[in-house]
Image (cartoon, grey):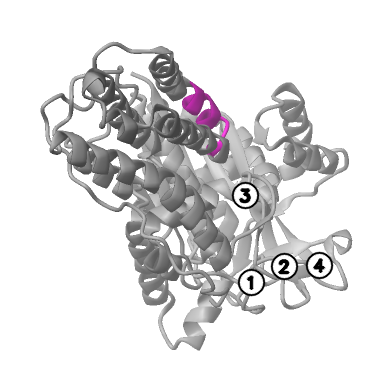
């Protein structure tokens, strides 16, 4: 048995989920579904990061206790994943006692090993990113992702000796070129590691912030939110001694956004090295989602698209498909209502939906809705069978590299091939020739069996609609990965007509 462990970020729950959260989680979910379909034992983890200064501040503004505030928002994330067909196996909360025990144990172990020390620190502190920053990171006096400039702070902090692990991290990245994908992010971190990176402040004094996991040996400090949250990747597996950790951790692949690249490289790699935890197998880093104005989506700009509203308007499967097809993972790209609408109308309604509608309609019209048995295959059918047979392996190879858009693109090219097959074989002409009855049976059967293959191949991307397609084809709703040709639709079974993707009228606009 092979184990695979896929994680989303442990989302900071100071507000409701936005499209960036949906983008990462949907990619992770689709990867997990493909790997599970291929026979791997898969765990998909997501979760809620509930500690830190921003949570405490937001809770105060909402006139709620921090725990109640964080719990309310954590539930909103769980509900969002349900509505977006994201099905995590694990949902970690940093407020859970089991997680706090792991954090405390790790802190104690590092402290006793001399990896943590107490010192006064004075520097610029970003409240938005909840970390100290350097002058060279600032653009026009602030971090590009922050609304407000950092503030000057002087306070006693416990520090983790992060810089002591710099040479090891640099060598790891040099020896493992594919550890961080796409490779431009590896290059970015390697450049940072050419110079000292400093040590990491991992505590906050309780007289300023008391919302967090206490430092085990000093009740006057709580744990820095990032040190706490990153351990949320291992605590649900029962680190260090439970079998699940030994089984799943060696295969771990993190899916993150590039705004948290440094924390998942400099912070997390040095932490795992100090703790004796093997580094992650792969870090998949997404780019920024841009609004229709070409600027990074943000609440302040009002240029974002609400993922739940988009799912309600266009259908959750159309949204999931658009998010992997429109932007190559790792690069910046625009997501707008217009973009989703175009993908729905062109790719899904015109190409796939129309293919299914025509095939089912012709079987209904020419064979009373019963699946015919094929006669002799000709060259055109042999080409289709060959393509359907080779696609599962091709798709999985792309999925392993988080090239989900290219994987779906290969399947949609197959859909175009099938549409071309309809045009060249002309079933409506064959239906008028009594001598072409066997040929018509072969063409109709080929279309139905190929649609069954498509439904299996696209099921991880669009689970709802592909279940619906299999139902129309009269087969089991459960997808079957790499099903051999001829093991899908059964001659003599009954199909039903239906419209998978009703087209949307154009011009809805890009309102949030």
- Residue 100 visible: no
Percent across and percent down for residue 209 are 57, 74
Residue 434: quadrant of the picture: top left
Along the horizontal axis of the image, is 212 left or right of 265? left
Q: Quadrant of the N terminus?
A: top left
The residue under label 1 is: 298
State the mark number for residue 397: none
The residue under label 2 is: 295
The verdict on residue 401 being magenta is yes
Along the line of sight, which residue is nearer the eye, 131 or 302? 302
Percent across and percent down for residue 181 are 66, 36
Q: Are marks 3 and 2 in contact (CB under 8 Å)?
A: no
Label 4 crowd (10 A; few <14 / some 14-19 / many >=20): some
The residue under label 3 is: 327
Q: Main secondary structure of the magenta part?
A: helix
Residue 112: quadrant of the picture: top right
Of the image marks 4 and 1, the number of the one nearer the N terminus? 4
């Amino acid at each position: 048995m092979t184990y695979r462990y896929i994680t989303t970020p442990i989302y900071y729950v100071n507000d409701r989920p936005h499209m960036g959260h949906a983008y990462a989680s949907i990619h992770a979910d689709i990867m997990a579904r493909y790997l599970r379909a291929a026979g791997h034992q898969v765990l998909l983890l997501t979760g809620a990061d509930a500690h830190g200064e921003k949570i405490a501040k937001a809770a105060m503004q909402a006139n709620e206790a921090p725990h109640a505030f964080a719990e309310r928002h954590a539930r909103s994330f769980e509900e969002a994943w349900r509505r977006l067909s994201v099905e995590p196996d694990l949902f970690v909360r940093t407020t859970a006692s089991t997680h706090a025990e792991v954090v405390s144990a790790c802190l104690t172990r590092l402290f006793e090993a001399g990896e943590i020390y107490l010192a006064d620190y004075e520097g610029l502190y970003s409240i938005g990113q909840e970390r100290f920053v350097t002058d060279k990171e600032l653009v026009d006096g602030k971090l590009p992702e922050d609304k407000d400039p950092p503030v000057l702070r002087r306070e006693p902090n416990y520090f983790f000796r992060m810089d002591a692990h710099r040479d090891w991290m640099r060598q790891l990245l040099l020896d493992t070129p594919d550890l961080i994908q796409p490779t431009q992010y590896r290059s970015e971190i390697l450049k940072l590691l050419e110079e000292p990176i400093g040590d990491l402040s991992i505590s906050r004094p309780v007289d300023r912030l008391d919302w967090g996991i206490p430092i085990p040996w000093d009740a006057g400090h709580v744990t820095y939110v990032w040190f706490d949250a990153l351990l949320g990747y291992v605590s649900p597996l029962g680190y260090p001694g439970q079998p699940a950790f030994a089984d799943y951790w060696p295969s771990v692949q993190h899916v993150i956004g590039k705004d948290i690249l440094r924390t998942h490289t400099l912070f997390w790699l040095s932490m795992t090295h100090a703790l004796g935890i093997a580094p992650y197998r792969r870090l998949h880093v997404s780019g920024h989602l841009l609004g229709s104005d070409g600027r990074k989506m943000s609440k302040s700009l009002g240029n974002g698209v609400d993922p739940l509203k988009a799912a309600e308007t266009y259908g959750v499967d159309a949204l999931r498909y658009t998010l992997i097809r429109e932007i190559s993972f790792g690069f910046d790209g625009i997501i707008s209502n217009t973009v989703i609408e175009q993908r729905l109308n062109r790719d899904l309604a015109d190409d796939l939906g129309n293919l299914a509608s025509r095939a089912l309609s012709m079987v209904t019209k020419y064979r009373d809705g019963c699946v015919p048995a094929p006669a002799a295959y000709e060259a055109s059918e042999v080409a289709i069978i060959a393509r359907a047979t080779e696609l599962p392996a091709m798709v999985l190879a792309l999925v392993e590299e988080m090239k989900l858009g290219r994987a779906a693109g290969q399947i949609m090219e197959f859909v175009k091939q099938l549409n071309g097959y309809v045009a060249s074989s002309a079933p409506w002409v064959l239906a008028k020739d009594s001598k072409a009855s066997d040929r018509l049976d072969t063409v109709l059967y080929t279309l139905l069996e190929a649609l069954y293959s498509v439904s299996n191949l696209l099921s991880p991307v669009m689970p709802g609609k592909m279940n619906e397609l299999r139902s129309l084809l009269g087969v089991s709703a459960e997808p079957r990965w790499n099903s051999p040709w001829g093991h899908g639709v059964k001659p003599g079974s009954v199909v039903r007509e239906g419209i998978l993707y009703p087209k949307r009228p154009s011009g809805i606009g890009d309102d949030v």
